[in-house]
Image (spheres, rainbow, N blue to C red):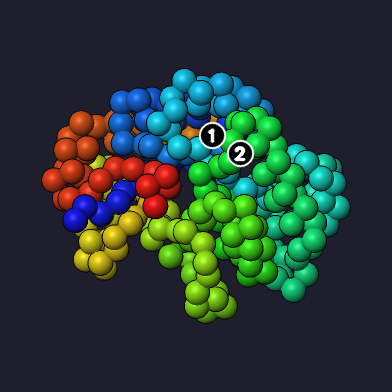
Amino acid sequence: MSSLLIVNADDFGLCRAVNYGIIESHRSGIVNSTTAMMNMPAISDAAKLSHDYPNLSVGMHFVLTAGQPFSSMPSLSRDGLLGKWLWDITPSELPLNEIEEELNLQYQKFLEVFGCKPSHIDSHHHVHMIEGIFPIVVNFAQEKGVALRVDRQLEKNWLPLSYQVASTDSFSSEFYGDEISESLFLQILDNAKQRGNHSVEVMSHPAFIDNALLKSNYAYPRLNELDVLTSENLKAQILERGFKIGSYRDI
């Protein structure tokens, strides 16, 4: 029996270079899943592109650490913007009501822009795995009937032992950084098979480069990811290892 491999490209909508990199990684590579940042400038462009590629599964990338929120979020925003300072707030001081409202508004924006439910929910900088935020997102995903990325590497002892929401075994932090290669990708899969994982998600960030992306701290490595994810050799090696390349639609 084949194991399911989901290669998800994060940050759809961040800028046009990211959008076209994700589309190229789908059209000519192994990316069948992406997640969209609803509060980013190129989100309308991302939605238009996705309509031309219906086999690309689109989920929602919940954002609490970048851009402008849809709600006021007085406890988390500074000069009207969100940032990584969220990680400096202790779980007991998180404004959970504000976070829940923002989650709902980003979801409603997804329905408006894409015209359908997201295939699944994950988050920018893994914020949905933060203590206090995780139960909110789990309950929301269950209520909406959508799947959820659960980062196994980020699981903590406070996570519930069971939660009724579809997910994969996600190893999202391994395929990232300056040492991206085909051998690294295949090593992630080999390790997953040794652990007995039957469904595996690998997070990725393929992109071309434009001036907007150059403002990011993670720009040029995205070109390397694009090269790896569109490699015919890599795709052949994945299939030889008994993986079926799919998306959250296949869970």
Residue 118 vertical position relative to residue 195 in the rendered view, above or below:
above
Q: Is residue 198 left or right of residue 166?
A: left
Residue 215 vertical position relative to residue 189 in the rendered view, above or below:
above
Label 1 sits on a secondary structure element that is strand
Q: Which residue is mark 1?
A: 12
Residue 76 visible, this orientation: no
Q: For the point 40% across and 58% down, which residue is it?
A: 168
Q: For the point 44% across and 28% down, which residue is it?
A: 54
User: Distance from label 2 to label 1 (Cα)?
Assistant: 6 Å
Q: Which residue is mark 2?
A: 37
- Is mark 2 in CB contact (under 8 Å) with mark 1? yes
Three-letter residue code for mark 2: Met
Q: Position of residue 166 (x, y in %)?
A: 47, 59
Q: Position of residue 66 (x, y in %)?
A: 67, 43
Three-letter residue code for mark 1: Phe
Label 2 sits on a secondary structure element that is loop
Rendered image quadrant of residue 167? bottom left
First reached walking from the N terminus: tag 2 or tag 1: 1
Q: Position of residue 12 (x, y in %)?
A: 53, 34
Residue 5 visible, this orientation: yes
- Point out the residue furthest to the left here: 240
